[in-house]
Amino acid sequence: MSAALFEKDAHVLAAHRKSERPPFAGQWLLPMALVREDEAAEDALRRHARDQFGVTLGAEQFVETVYLQDPDDRRQYVTNIFRAPIEGGPLRFNAGGDYDDARWVTAADLDQLWMPPALRDPLARIMTDPDYVSEIDWSQPGEARPLGEHPAPEGPPPDNRAGWDTISAAYQEHRYGDRYGERLMWSWRASEDDLYVLGAVRGKRALVLGCGGGQDVVALARLGATAVGIDQSPAQLAYARRYAGNRRVDNASFVEGDLTDLSRFDDASFDFAISIHALDYVADVERALAEAARVLKPGGVLAVAVKHPFDVHIDGGPPYSMSTPYWSDHSDWTWEFPDGVSARFRAYYRTVSRWVDLLVSAGFDLERMWEPKEDTLPAAAGDTLDNAWMALLPYTLVLKARKR
């Protein structure tokens, strides 16, 4: 789609699409046109401006690309926003066209309009910085296409392994460390004592996928399991070995490796495979799950905790709103710590139904899911989670599956 940014004295023109005119029926938008196969994005904008508002445009300036999802049919659209100077006018609202209302609005007015958040937020940014122009122009000729068929406006993925090496010391000092004692934590507040995901593990062999600083491995060892942790970050593993050594835990060990290659472990050699907030950093999760299935005994349990697939797309303070579509499959972000340490990461997201499909395809039967309501659980020292947020939606999704 192409969107017109008509500007006048710190106002932009917003138009209300008629309830019978999809896409985005009944919503406030910038004037927007679907791009036909035989025209460029700018051509679509000129056609739309002429047909709907009776004006001709000067040289358009690309500003930004946004990704919008129609809430009615859930189709996703790549939309290029252009500053659109009017050369021939004045504006004349076409009551027989796509819109039933149009008005000049300020940035402060946007919160009062039923407008897709994925449009409202960047539009507010553009309006408060009149010189803002995206460094990337993804405008293309041809009709608008679903997100999955368009190139994403981003560079190569960050190196997650290097990122964890960089922040390991700061992460353990400020974020995790030994604040939970030796409890097995499925989330920042929900422990095994709260959820009872695994049940009895004494005398069993457990593999922790993405063990990080070793806290989960030590917790399982304290519960009586022989626990092995595997992680790709040498810095995290160095911390894990010190952590276990300081607690004099004998039945815990650690190896460096990739979760998609568990070839150092024999087939059917573990009773449990556990991954707590690690698979969000794995691109090829299908291969990781297949490897987990291989090393588990028949009837063995795979227990996975990930950032909840709905929580990851909520942003900002109240009133909370969706910042990206639920079906978005990844995001790049920077983790910063008070001592100036920071690293760039890529997180991969799967919907709840996608997780079910992945587990079934890997040879598991899903037994149970948990979505803990963590605002009701006690917080550890230094906890920064927002109780108001967690009263509205879960932070973590926990899945328990059994190998067929």
Image (cartoon, grey):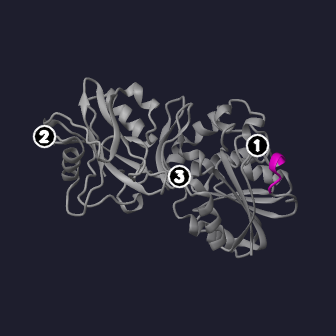
* Mark 2 to mark 3 CA distance (whole Å): 37 Å
Q: What kind of residue is marked 2? A: Gly
Tag 2: Cα neighbours inside 10 Å, few (<14), some, or many (≥20)?
A: few
Residue 326 numbered mark, or none: 3
Query: Which mark is first along the chain, 3 or 2?
Result: 2
Tag 1 residue: 246
Tag 1: Cα neighbours inside 10 Å, few (<14), some, or many (≥20)?
A: few
Viewer-nearest of discs 1 and 2: 2
Q: Quadrant of the C terminus?
A: bottom right
Question: What stretch of residues is rendered in magenta?
Answer: 193-197
Instruction: Report the predominant secondary structure element of the magenta stretch.
Output: helix
Residue 313 is situated, as x and y percent measured from the top left of the image, at 53, 45
Residue 192 is situated, as x and y percent measured from the top left of the image, at 80, 49
Residue 58 numbered mark, or none: 2
Q: What kind of residue is marked 1? A: Asn
* Mark 1 to mark 2 CA distance (whole Å): 70 Å
Quadrant of the image occupied by residue 188: top right
Horizontally, residue 237 falls left or right of residue 1, namely right
Viewer-nearest residue: 173 or 2: 2
